[in-house]
Amino acid sequence: MDIDDLVNDANEREAKHGPAGEEDQDRGIDSMTDDVLSTEESGSRERIGIVEHFFSKVSVVAIKLDAELAVGDSIEIDTGNGTVSETVSSMQIDRESITRAQAGDSVGIKLSRAVPAGSAVYRQETQG
């Protein structure tokens, strides 16, 4: 079973039984985008997108990208209560595994823990 199958299963469960209870899920993505609208760069990280939804049953995040993202990139998600750091090991668009995504794409990425919708996503620059 791939990430998209898990996401589809989670969507079907949520359609039947309601959302998993993430309190930020009720806010519209447009209002949350306003909270983190700028394409800020701070220190060694660059804002590359925003969390659209987190599927808690399968621990997959949907991210709307403002910039390119590739498998192997290190990302940091600012939850408002701390950060979650991950290395992108795989990602998908519409049930297709991809290695690179562009600005404007919505991608699914498996995470180790939950993050709220509306969280800013940053690419962590590697020290060379």
Image (cartoon, rainbow, N blue to C red):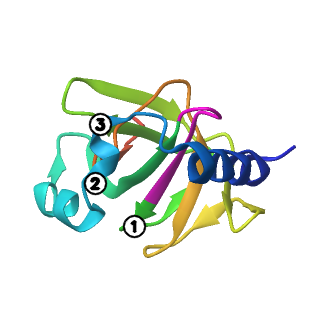
Q: How far apart are marks 1 and 2 (CA)?
A: 8 Å
Q: What residue type is labelled 2?
A: Arg
Residue 79 x %, y %: 27, 34
Residue 87 x %, y %: 55, 35
Task: Check disc 2: other Cα within 10 Å, few if <14, some if 14-19, many if 20+.
Answer: many
Is 38 above or below relative to 86?
below
Q: Residue 67 carries which label?
A: 1
Q: What residue type is labelled 3?
A: Glu
Q: Which amino acid does label 1 sit on?
A: Ala
Label 2: which secondary element: strand
**Residue furthest to the front:** 16
Q: Are marks 3 and 1 in contact (CB under 8 Å)?
A: no
Viewer-side residue, 57 vs 109: 57
Magenta highlight range:
56-63
**Residue furthest to the right:** 1
Q: Which is in the foreground here, disc 3 or disc 2?
A: 3
The C terminus is located in which quarter? top left
- Who's the residue at 57% across and 47% down the image? 14
Q: How far apart are marks 3 and 2 (CA)?
A: 23 Å
Determine whether, in the image, residue 30 is placed left or right of residue 109.
left
According to the image, label 2 marks what residue? Answer: 47
Mark found first going from the N terminus, 3 or 2: 3
Mark found first going from the N terminus, 1 or 2: 2
Count of numbered tags: 3
- Who's the residue at 51% across and 58% down the image? 69
According to the image, label 3 marks what residue? Answer: 23
